[in-house]
Image (spheres, grey):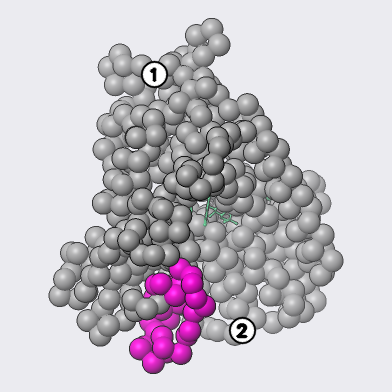
Amino acid sequence: MKTQQYDYDVMFIGAGHGSDGAVMLNKHGYKVAKIEAEKVGGTCTNWACNAKIVLDGPVKLSRTHEQLKDIVQGDLRLSWEQNMAHKHEVIDPLADGMEKKFTGSGIDVLHGWAKFVDNHTVEIDGKTYTSDKFVIATGLHPHQLDVPGKEYAHDSKDFLDLNPLPKRMTVIGSGYIGMEFATIANAFGSEVTVLMRGDRVLRQFNAEYVDEVVQDMTERGVKFIKNATVSEFTQENNHYIVHYDDGKTVETDWILDATGRVPNTSGYGLDELGIHYSDKGIQVNGKMQTNIDNIFVAGDVADTTYPKLTPTATHHSNYIAHFIMGDTKDDMKPFVVPTVTFTSPRIAEAGVTVAEAKADREKYDILESDVTGDWFRKVNEDKIGKQTLVFDKAGHLVGATEVSEEAENFINAVLPAIALKLERDQIEQIVPLFPSIMHEGWKKL
Ligand SMILES: Cc1cc2nc3c(=O)[nH]c(=O)nc-3n(C[C@H](O)[C@H](O)[C@H](O)COP(=O)(O)OP(=O)(O)OC[C@H]3O[C@@H](n4cnc5c(N)ncnc54)[C@H](O)[C@@H]3O)c2cc1C
Ligand SMILES: NC(=O)c1ccc[n+]([C@@H]2O[C@H](COP(=O)([O-])OP(=O)(O)OC[C@H]3O[C@@H](n4cnc5c(N)ncnc54)[C@H](O)[C@@H]3O)[C@@H](O)[C@H]2O)c1
């Protein structure tokens, strides 16, 4: 129900993808504001997904060139400086562009740090605003290793603005950020060492496919050090020393601390209001409400079982918009979140994982294939390409995983079948264009 009682119907704290639902609310006549302390678009747009994918672009190109060097002849030289300049050209205008689009359509954008005064009021730089409802979408910040010399280490945001690229780079952590940035830095000629806390990288992905990626990166010169406990960073002349285990060291020019990200839950009044949270984020019920029912949570800062990714943030936010508009009174329905790590090759997956399927053969059938022999994959002579499809016993596709240069496209192509649990006659109604990755995938369903 819209209200005349407050300045706004809904205020979003944080203007990343967790605030995407503002557009729908605004279209339906709700008075909406986004509050942003840094840049409109938040982390993904300015300091993560978009920026990274621009820097990653030439990695795939250079690999394809390597594979087709008899056809595309001559040497290829990648320029980090030009790549970084291109990134700025593509990414820097986005925040202003988005802001103009929002304000042009009637969504207010308020700049500054929001802090709750009470459950209907926030203060931004000494000025108060009231709202019927709030959506907290404040995201995460980088975890920082707590070791002596931690000030010598950098985070993902620093890497995405790094220029020039250092000759030697040491990455601590081998999750998404560690592996993606190691891939980019290696392709542009930096000598990369990855220090792993355990003995597996990218633990959330199919181990067999991860091994393919690690082997390939190793052949390209990336050094992986397993089971390393980092104890200190020191500076020596114009370089740094990473100390690990008992007395072991790596000499380096730049240190990336990629040891995870932590929810933004402090400094804006959660404790004062009594909102419940933990180190996993702000606690929510099935309707994405906090323990104060006019305050909702969307995106990375929400403590849900879904991976903390952009599609999750958008989905949370749109669900909240529908709930506020009264389109549904139900809890958010379970949804499938596809995920990809932009290494080279990539690994992407959606739905039931290979590990889950292998653990329950009574419930699932598994179709594994090496796709490098498929004529369409031979176009670029890709050397790594494996795929696992998981079906339930009734024959519905319920999960898919691929390692290849096209993995994210393949997973997106089969995603509708997984997300909607399509029946045979529905699958046959969809006729993908040819030749395409989707055509190749769809005929296997
Ligand atoms: C390096 C990197 C690469 C990534 N790559 C991918 C990818 O390829 N694909 C993918 O799906 N996901 C990726 N992610 C994850 C993705 O960026 C996040 O899932 C997404 O940004 C979450 O959106 P959000 O709105 O919840 O949070 P954010 O985008 O973090 O937005 C939160 C916003 O809230 C603002 N804020 C915080 N507190 C306040 C306050 N009190 N007042 C006002 N404003 C406040 C912050 O300034 C920030 O802009 C990546 C993340 C990183 C770090
Ligand atoms: N392609 C994508 O979708 C993408 C890309 C980048 C980031 N992200 C998102 O960003 C977030 C953060 O990514 P991330 O890679 O920082 O986190 P992550 O959780 O994927 O990886 C963290 C890594 O740091 C290691 N680690 C943790 N504590 C450590 C310690 N004390 N010493 C040594 N190693 C330690 C972990 O073992 C792990 O390898 C994730 O939520 C992810 O969803 C997504």
Q: Are marks 2 and 1 in contact (CB under 8 Å)?
A: no
Q: Name the residue under label 2.
A: 326
Q: Is residue 217 visible?
A: yes
Q: Which amino acid does label 1 sit on?
A: Val
Residue 259, relative to residue 207: is it above or below? above
The C terminus: image quadrant: bottom left
User: Where, by quadrant of the figure, is residue 141 drawn?
Assistant: top right
Instruction: Mark 2 vs mark 1: give the one in front.
Output: 1
**Going by the image, does 359 lie left or right of 63?**
left
Q: Residue sitting at 71 percent across and 71 percent down? A: 23
Dot 2 amino acid type: Gly
Residue at 70% in and 64% down: 11
213 sits left or right of 187 in the view: left
Count the marks: how many?
2
Q: Which quadrant of the figure has residue 376?
A: bottom left
Residue at image location 61% in from the left, 60% down from the top: 17
On screen, residue 433 above or below 412: below
Q: Which of marks 2 and 1 is nearer the N terminus?
A: 1
Q: Is residue 125 magenta?
A: no
Q: Give the main secondary structure of the magenta stretch.
A: helix
Q: Relative to 104, does residue 97 appear above or below in the rendering? A: above
In terms of secondary structure, where does tag 2 sit? loop
Residue designated by label 1 = 250
**Residue in the foreground of this view, choosing between 348 and 132:** 348
Residue shown at 77% from the left, 49% from the top: 93
User: Which residues, given as a range, are shown in magenta?
Assistant: 414-441
